[in-house]
Amino acid sequence: MLVCIDIGNTNIVLAVHDGKSWIHTWRVYSDEKKTGDEYYVIFRSLFESEKLDVSRIDNVIISSVVPNLTLSIQKNVKRLFNKEALLVTHDVSTGLVRSSIPGELGSDLLCNLAYAHYLKPDDTVMTVDFGTALTFSTVSRDGQVLGVAIVPGLLTSVHALFGATAQLPQVDLRIPSSALGRSSEDSIRAGIMYGYAGLVNSIIEKTEEETGEKLFIIATGGLSKTISPLIPRIDMLDKLHTLNGLRLIASLNF
């Protein structure tokens, strides 16, 4: 079995694949103040809760965009599974043209691009990841990383609005019935949901204009399903796209 760990700015996603399917996935809040021992207890308890035998784990792969947590999680992998985890860097095999990978490209986006190209090798593909940041990563049909656009994520924008204003409330995001909000909550939903849908469509159109290619669009991340009805250009929803990218990279390197 393979363990994939995706260390993000908001959550650490821990998942187990048995060779056929994902049998377990968990989300743990990313907290740089937690000690290594705390993370060890959390990870061990998750496996124990599902009666998973850690001796059955063959390999572990990690993607991390939080450098302060990377070493701690690597040490806990060794402690829990007695395995050295493969850390996703620009030096691992991904199926992409290595010379085209920008030096500052995050490992999560590298996973997204690798799996996008694997899924649709005959298309130019954009992965739209609705996470802490909203990212647009594009790969050509020949495996060249064309580039990335990044804006604050939907929830990040809501939290910033709530934190910087005296009277606007924190809201849960869903598609409102109208762009003309009649309450503070619906006004925020209208601005965020319709506004971000327009933003996504605009980035897609601009990228197609620059590449001269019709893009195949894959959406992933927490709010991708919620906002997708407003973005008809989305061709595929894949909640586990980044994890699938990690699994693909593992298969190319173990």
Image: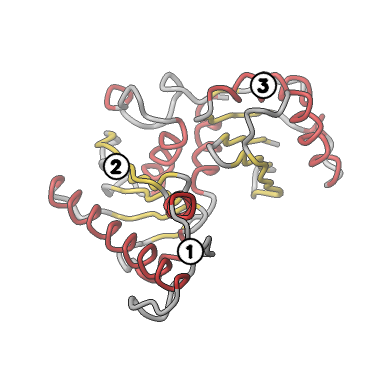
Characterize the local packing of mark 2: few (<14), some (14-19) or many (20 or more) Cα atoms within 10 angstroms: few
Report whether 45 appears left or right of 233: right
Q: Where residue 157 is drawn, which disc sits there?
A: none
Comparing 95 with 174, the one in front is 174
Q: Which residue is mark 2?
A: 149
Q: Is residue 157 above or below residue 226?
A: above
Are the residues tagged 2 and 3 within 8 Å (C-beta)? no
Q: CA distance from mark 3 to mark 1?
A: 32 Å
Q: Is residue 10 above or below residue 217?
A: above
Q: Residue at x 37, y 29 (%)?
A: 105
Q: Position of residue 199 (x, y in %)?
A: 28, 57
Q: Residue at x 47, y 48 (%)?
A: 131
Q: Which residue is mark 1?
A: 225
Q: Which residue is mark 3?
A: 72
Q: CA distance from mark 2 to mark 1?
A: 20 Å
SS at circle 2 = strand
Q: Looking at the picture, which amino acid does disc 1 mark?
A: Lys
Instruction: Of the two numbered discs 2 and 1 on the same chain, state the one appearing first in sequence.
Output: 2
Characterize the local packing of mark 3: few (<14), some (14-19) or many (20 or more) Cα atoms within 10 angstroms: some
SS at circle 1 = helix
**Quarter of image, res 41:** top right
Report whether 88 appears left or right of 153: right
Q: Residue at x 48, y 58 (%)?
A: 223
